[in-house]
Each structure stands twice: as structure tokens, then as C-alpha cells.
Image: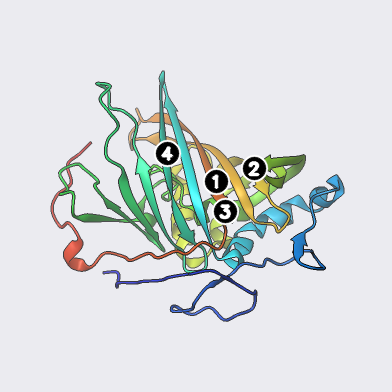
């Protein structure tokens, strides 16, 4: 049973302030930030390809740590799955607290096969080792939550929720084996450095935080390949602004399992926003049987 947790981050505070469960805010300054101060302070814009080309592997392997120091952000997700001639896209939006490893997303499923209007969004709460879903369907009452142990998922919760956990998306980069600097770009009006490479999920699991270690280890075993191709876009503070993963998994546990190609995109913005995540009480959980989809 997961105890009730409640966390509020009203704003960004200077780096170095001790984080506690009831702290007033989260750190917004990241290591390596270069500031010019006069009447005010501003970030120095990207001006040299050489800055982005230096040690891309090491920079990407540290990206998750930089997010933790950033504190919080808003999130948008997109997951495209293709098998045979069928292609489905699932979108989500919400907020995430990287220091506490807690998030909340509203995930919208596509139209059903009959072409009816989009279904009601699923509310998802992301926590270390667990995924909570409300309005799950499959026989679950609309006001009840179901809990999924992410360590027991063959995809490590990179696919099951219809959205990749934002911190897990960054922790995949801990397994970066090869990477190259592509050049400067822009994401949501912010100057970024674009990197392209491959990450090894087993290596990522070894270096991941405690909550993501087991799920990433499961993904390394359950995916069609333990290697993930990615495109990552980092701002001048080293924070991930966008990361795109491409991988495949086998839909089924038998010889006739069908490979499913997945393209997952995670977009991070508005760092330092207030985040409040309340995990469900035991009375809010659904204990019945979930229908097979």
C-alpha cells in the first residue's frame, strides 16, 4: 500500500536550498548556467557549435540529474504506435516534480474503431514504482483508481500508460552509448542543442534512480531490442526540453507476438511551476477484476 503523499511547489528558489517534503519551492538554477548580471540577469544565448559538440555522451548521461535540480515543469506527451497497417497516436499533458518523482497527466485516447468521439481522458498519477489510473475503463468505476506496479511491466511503463514517464524518459539517456551533436535548433521559442544517438536500457537501469531501476531493467528484457534510438534537445542550462525515443516491443508472450513500433515524444516547458500531487487513499482504489481489452 502506498501512503498518501501531498506536495506543493509554489515557485522556483535558488539552487542549494535544502529540499524537504514540505519545502516552499524547488530549485530552478542548474549547474553550468552562465549568467550576465547588470540591471538584471539573463542567460547567454547559444552562440557556438563547439559548446554543444563537447562531450555529448557525458552531457546526455547527466540530463536526468539536471532535471532534478530544475525542480518542476509542465509536460506534453505524444506516443505513436504502429503495427501492420494500423497507426495510433495517444496524447497527454500535465505537470511533473522531478525532485520528488511525482507527476500528473491527462491522457487522451484516440477515436475508437467505430469513429465515435474521443473518449474521456484518463487521469494518471506517476510515482516511484507505480502508475495510478482513473477513468481506466475495462469495468473500473469512473470514480475509482487502479494501481499498476511498473517494475512488473515488460515495457517498464515506457508504453503502458500511453505516455512515457518524463523522468524515465530522461533516465533512458543515462544509458547513452553513442551520440553526436546535430546543431542548434529551437523548441517552443527556446534555443536548444540537438543531439542524436542510441541508449542501452540495461546500462540506463544500472545508473537510474531507485524508482526507475526495476522498470528500466524490465524494459531492457521485454523490448524487441535493448537499444533505444533518440533525439534530445537541451537548453543552455542542460535541461531536456524535448526528447524523442524510438523502439519496438512484442505485443504478446507467445511465438506469434506482433512487433509494435513506438515513437514517444516528451516535451518539457515552464520550469518551476507549482505542482501538487495527491496519491489515492486506500478507499479510492478499485479492488475488483479488470476486464481484458
Structural distance between the alpha carbons of marks 3 and 4: 18 Å
Q: Earlier in the sequence, mark 3 or mark 2?
A: 3
Image coords of residue 75 (percent x, y):
49, 50
Image coords of residue 30 (percent x, y):
68, 66
Structural distance between the alpha carbons of marks 4 and 1: 11 Å
- Callout 3 touching callout 2 (CB < 8 Å): no
Q: Quadrant of the N terminus?
A: bottom left
Structural distance between the alpha carbons of marks 1 and 3: 11 Å
Identify residue for label 2. 187
Q: Earlier in the sequence, mark 2 or mark 1?
A: 2
- Callout 4 touching callout 2 (CB < 8 Å): no
Classify residue 83 by image quadrant: top left
Seen as rendered, the residue at the extreme left is 288
The answer to whether one can see residue 270 in this image is: yes
Identify residue for label 4. 91
- Callout 2 touching callout 1 (CB < 8 Å): yes
Classify residue 187 by image quadrant: top right
Structural distance between the alpha carbons of marks 4 and 2: 18 Å
Image coords of residue 81 (percent x, y):
43, 31
Identify residue for label 1. 267
Residue 252 circle label:
none
Is residue 264 positioned above or below 209 on the image?
above
At x 60%, y 64%, the residue is 70
Is residue 41 positioned above or below 252 on the image?
below
Q: Earlier in the sequence, mark 3 or mark 4?
A: 4
At x 69%, y 41%, the residue is 186
Q: Earlier in the sequence, mark 4 or mark 2?
A: 4
Structural distance between the alpha carbons of marks 2 and 1: 9 Å
Identify residue for label 3. 170
Q: Residues within 10 Å of mark 3 (few under 14, many from 20)?
A: many
Amino acid at each position: 500500500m502506498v501512503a498518501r503523499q501531498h506536495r506543493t511547489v509554489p515557485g522556483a528558489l535558488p539552487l542549494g536550498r535544502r529540499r524537504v517534503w514540505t519545502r516552499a519551492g524547488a530549485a530552478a538554477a542548474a549547474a553550468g548556467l552562465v549568467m550576465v548580471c547588470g540591471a538584471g540577469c539573463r542567460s547567454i544565448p547559444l552562440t557556438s557549435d563547439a559548446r554543444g559538440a563537447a562531450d555529448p555522451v557525458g552531457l546526455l548521461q547527466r540530463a536526468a540529474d539536471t532535471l532534478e535540480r530544475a525542480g518542476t515543469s509542465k509536460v506534453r506527451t505524444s506516443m505513436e504506435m504502429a503495427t501492420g497497417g494500423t497507426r495510433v497516436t495517444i496524447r497527454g499533458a500535465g505537470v511533473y516534480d522531478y525532485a520528488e518523482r511525482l507527476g500528473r497527466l491527462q491522457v487522451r485516447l484516440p477515436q475508437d474503431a467505430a469513429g465515435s468521439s474521443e473518449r474521456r481522458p484518463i487521469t494518471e498519477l506517476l510515482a516511484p514504482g507505480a502508475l495510478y489510473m482513473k477513468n481506466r475503463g475495462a469495468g473500473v468505476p469512473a470514480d475509482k483508481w487502479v494501481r499498476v506496479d511498473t517494475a512488473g511491466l515488460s515495457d517498464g511503463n515506457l508504453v503502458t500508460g500511453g505516455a512515457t514517464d518524463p523522468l524515465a524518459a530522461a533516465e533512458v539517456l543515462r544509458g547513452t552509448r553513442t551520440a553526436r551533436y546535430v546543431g542548434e535548433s529551437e523548441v517552443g521559442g527556446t534555443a536548444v542543442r540537438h543531439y542524436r544517438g542510441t541508449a542501452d536500457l540495461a546500462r540506463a537501469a544500472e545508473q537510474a534512480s531507485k524508482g526507475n531501476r526495476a522498470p528500466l531493467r524490465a524494459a531492457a528484457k521485454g523490448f524487441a531490442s535493448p537499444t533505444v534510438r533518440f533525439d534530445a534537445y537541451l537548453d543552455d542550462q542542460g535541461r531536456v526540453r524535448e526528447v524523442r525515443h524510438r523502439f519496438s516491443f512484442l505485443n504478446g508472450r507467445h511465438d506469434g507476438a506482433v512487433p509494435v513500433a513506438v515513437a514517444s515524444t516528451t516535451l518539457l516547458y515552464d520550469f518551476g511551476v507549482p505542482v501538487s500531487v495527491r496519491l489515492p487513499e486506500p478507499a479510492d482504489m478499485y479492488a475488483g477484476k479488470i476486464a481484458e481489452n
